Amino acid sequence: MDFSENDLYKTIDFPSEEVLLKEKNSKFFGYAFPVTSEEDIKENLERLRKEHFSARHWCYAYQIGTEKIQYRANDDGEPNNSAGMPIYGQIQSFEVTNVLVVVVRYFGGVKLGVGGLISAYKTAAQMALENATIVEKTINKHFIISFSYAHMNKVMRIIKEKNLQIVSQKMEMDCEIEISIRKKNVQNLLDTFESLYEIKLTEI
């Protein structure tokens, strides 16, 4: 996925409803979760392991990040590349990021073979993502504007004119405002602040 051309990416805002695929007595439950950190991923996996404590496998794949991508595919005891990679393939195919897809398998006594497993995990992952609401978001950059209290009005006027989103602010003798701005508007912002010597803009 190439984000360098634009500053949009696709993800999901809410966990999907559980989906169920039955294949030769085995049951495959599929889930998709919005995640932005490994901590989020761990929490979701732990919750599912408790919920499905008698299942045989909890296979998953995730991708986080927009410009620097991190991903992982886990077969959780299934034959190599028969579960995690087919699930990850669906994350790529739906072109989403900041997402975790988990497929929980209850073994039904009949072996499916590697081909059967690949097909089942892929389909369950696809169903989970089809069941999720995919949204488009902008890649945003965060900056700190540092200035003395005397320049408050000037800074606030720029924030209003540029329609910048304030994330947090600290107003004392020395003020700091953290703002969020869409990636494609960054250059324009830098140009605006370049001529203002008393006001400092730092990317974080």
Image: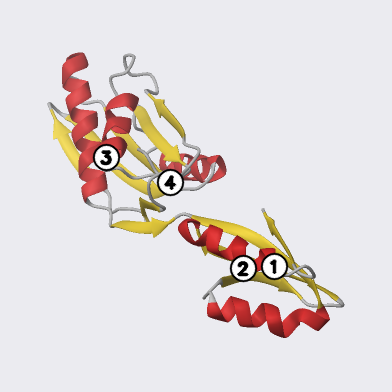
Question: Residue drawn 18% across and 35% down?
Answer: 123
Q: Is residue 89 left or right of residue 116?
A: right
Q: For the residues marked 1 and 4, what is the alpha-carbon distance in whole angstroms?
A: 37 Å
Q: What is the quadrant of the N terminus in the image?
A: top left
Q: For the residues marked 2 and 4, what is the alpha-carbon distance in whole angstroms?
A: 32 Å
Q: Is residue 135 above or below residue 116?
A: below
Residue density around tag 4, few if under 14, some if 14–19, many if 20 or more, within 10 Å: many
What residue is disc 4 on?
A: 98
Q: Which mark is residue 12?
A: none
Query: Is residue 112 visible in this depiction of the protein?
Result: no
Q: Is residue 155 left or right of residue 110?
A: right
Q: Nearer the viewer, residue 63 or 188?
A: 188
Q: Are marks 2 and 4 in contact (CB under 8 Å)?
A: no
Q: Which mark is residue 192?
A: 2
Q: For the residues marked 3 and 1, what is the alpha-carbon distance in whole angstroms?
A: 57 Å
As shown in the figure, which amino acid type bears the numbered disc 1?
Ser
Q: Are marks 2 and 3 in contact (CB under 8 Å)?
A: no
What residue is disc 3 on?
A: 29
Q: For the residues marked 2 and 3, what is the alpha-carbon distance in whole angstroms?
A: 52 Å
What residue is disc 1 on?
A: 195
Q: Tell me residue 79's x, y (percent).
A: 31, 14
Q: Are marks 3 and 1 in contact (CB under 8 Å)?
A: no
- Secondary structure, mark 4, is loop
Q: For the residues marked 2 and 1, what is the alpha-carbon distance in whole angstroms?
A: 6 Å
Q: Nearer the viewer, residue 179 or 32?
A: 179
